[in-house]
Image: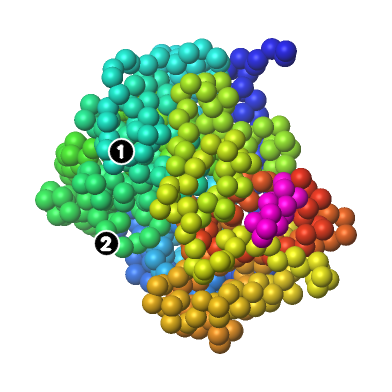
Amino acid sequence: MPQQASPLQVLQQQRLLLQLEYNTEKEAFRKQTEEMGVQRKVKRGDAWYPLKAGKSYYNSLNQLAIEVFRTSDQEIEHTFEFGKTVMFFSCEDNKIKYLSFTATVSYVDGDRMVCIIPNNGYLVTLQNTQNLGVQLSFDETSYRLMLEALDRAIKGKGRIGYLRDLFYSHQKAETFVFPPMQFPYLNPTQEEAVNRVLRAKDVAIVHGPPGTGKTTTLVEAIRETLMRESQVLVCAQSNMAVDWISEKLVDRGINVLRIGNPTRVNDKMLSFTYERRFEAHPDYPHLWAIRKAIRELRTHRKRGDEKYHQRLESLKGRATELEIRINNELFGEARVIACTLVGAANRLLDGQKFGTLFIDEAAQALEAACWIPIRRVSRVILAGDHCQLPPTVKSIAALKAGLGKTLMERIVENKPEVVTLLKIQYRMNDDIMRFSSNYFYDGQVESAPNVRYRGILDLDIPMEWVDTSAYDFKEEFIGESFGRINKEEAELTLNTLQQYFERIGKQRLLDERIDVGIISPYRAQVQYLRRLLMKREFFKPFRRQISVNTVDGFQGQERDIIVISMVRSNDDGQIGFLRDLRRMNVAITRARMKLIILGDAPTMTRHPFYRQLWQYIQSLKN
């Protein structure tokens, strides 16, 4: 048996791979920036052009903010969100000229975005630029923070050193001993998971397959932990996952302080953000007045004014004192501090220590990112499912060498005793769930009685596969980042959905608000399907009930009906990244009552997984 690598070797290897990923992504970004035209970037959702600059102001955190509005292509979904780095540019004769600074997205709401810019000088440049646009920039900061976190873990002494040595070895994790607590509204495996979290001194894992109530369990575990600790840190990889868990905690009456801005900008979500709370503090108007005085003093500085520095320092001192006071109160009241993993490096958290860190969607986070918040805590609870979406890794070499392996996967391998698998699912008809349960979870996941036989039509088969090989459709290659498209299959996808809708009947679809997700693994196919859907008269009344997205776009969501367009169709049985079976697991488990797959069976079934899936679906007909 090969000797197991030491914790330090594992982390040093991760550091090398992360550096490789950084170089790959930076190079790809440089090429894309130099070679790709503005319209392509706009189409991909990575740029807004043309752009209108709106008002500028200092926000409550004393950062200079400017509003910008996108004035065209409003239908296109974009990839801008809080915390992302952006670059402004001007465009003449399709030549892009970048302005000399980067900005950060503060928040996005529809076609309006607020960006934080470094200083006043850049503001003037911005406002005087013709043909203005904005695009995502390369994210240096996240990489820097992840590399620093790995260095800290490698050199770490004390608690962080202990956790590092524990996570990467077979050493037993420590636990408290007390009789199990009962939670009447949880099922037995959820109850066991909460008890295991409470008993853990070092680490526990809640493994939640699709539809098993992972969030419900996690919220309960956080609530119970707060009976024993005054404050916990809750993190996730994406802003969306942080929003989701924060909202559930707020609904249970827990005081959450959200560092960073939510992806869905509404009053409920904004009300627990740090920025909003800071602004609402009774001392804030006083602080604002002092900051204004500082800006005016700087602007109207007179030559030979001997008292200038003295006055400035005195004002700055008062401002800092007030900031510290407001901060202490906000952090003092909050029971949960919530942010992304990278957001845990925010200077607002400097010097803060927590008993427990909860990481949600831990199976989607790079290992290095998890080490950013771990330095602030003494025990770690991870929740997620390593049989669903993995972290995104752009470098194929880094992926093959193990950068995609998450901290959660390592701990599951090294310490099965700290893992609880949630075993009862509340989402899918049993036939839809059974294949995923057998293939990914050793058949251990069962359906709750109330969903086992759920369906839309009598005598309907919950899963079907429309084999497109009879039609001789062919996939087309669109380009590196978009992948592939299969236009005839897209048409057939909508025809198939229309036929199913006709069987259900218009009135029932509207009355019962039956909702549909159309999924394709390829972005080009998703955009093509969206365009087709907009053009079809038949689907007009149901627009609100149908969403089209990639597999990643449907993570954590569910629909009554799911239709999947597989796209791949060729003579060599090439299926590209559809070989990542975890993605398929996500796609097929979004459906509550009906799953329809469209794909070229001869192409797909050369792969053993798809062959089994095809055979399983055929067996349901008998």
- Asked whether 29 or 339 is in front, the reply is 339
Identify the residue position indicated by label 2 in the image: 267
- Asked whether 548 or 50 is in front, the reply is 548
Boundaries of the magenta span: 609-622
Mark 1 crowd level (few <14, some 14–19, many ≥20, 10 Å Cα): many
Q: Residue at x 34, y 69 (%)?
A: 55
Relative to 163, is 351 on the left or the right?
Answer: left
Can I make out residue 345 in this image?
Answer: no
Q: Amino acid at mark 2?
A: Asp
- Asked whether 470 or 252 is in front, the reply is 470
Can I make out residue 457 in this image?
Answer: yes
Q: Position of residue 455 (x, y in %)?
A: 49, 63
Q: Residue at x 27, y 31 (%)?
A: 182
What sort of colour scheme is used for the picture? rainbow
Q: Is 79 rendered above or below residue 128?
A: above
Magenta run includes residue 610: yes
Identify the residue position indicated by label 1 in the image: 220
Q: Residue at x 31, y 51 (%)?
A: 247
Q: Position of residue 395 (x, y in %)?
A: 69, 42
